[in-house]
Image (cartoon, rainbow, N blue to C red):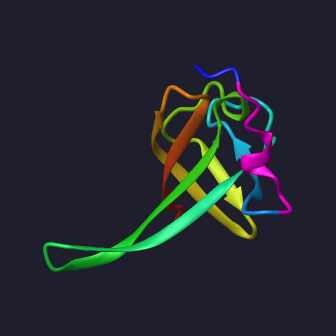
Amino acid sequence: MFSEDLTAFFNLGEHAVEAIYRPAAGAPAVPVNGIFENGYLEALGMAGSQPEFTCPAAGVPAFSAGDVLEIGDTDYTVVGARGDGTGVTVLQLQLKN
């Protein structure tokens, strides 16, 4: 993992938004800053979006599928996550029904 300070990448005054991370296991909810992307995706004749939230790994140290990430007034279910080895985690999201 890098020893660089990644705070500037997740500055609310720039590109980041604040979200509330709610673990499914009942642990307390925590605020986390990150970059939300909800890009349009079209593959094999099907269209949709693939929402992702990029944040500091320390912000969600014990993530698991089924956790909830609230961004604004919208809840997303965490369906996967991947770390990149630099202290950053990308949460793969699905709109919560």
In what quadrant of the picture does the N terminus appear?
Answer: top right
| Any part of residue 19 in sight | yes
The answer to whether residue 2 is left or right of residue 95 is right
Percent position of residue 6, x then y: 73, 37
Q: Is residue 26 magenta?
A: no
Q: Residue at x 58, y 58 (%)?
A: 76
Q: Residue at x 15, y 80 (%)?
A: 45
| Any part of residue 33 in sight | no
Furthest toward the front, the residue is 4
In this view, 7 is above or below 51: above
Percent position of residue 69, x then y: 65, 51
- How many dots with numbers? 0
Q: Residue at x 70, y 42 (%)?
A: 22
State the predominant SS element of the stretch in magenta: loop
Q: Is residue 12 magenta?
A: yes
Give the magenta part as a residue range: 4-13
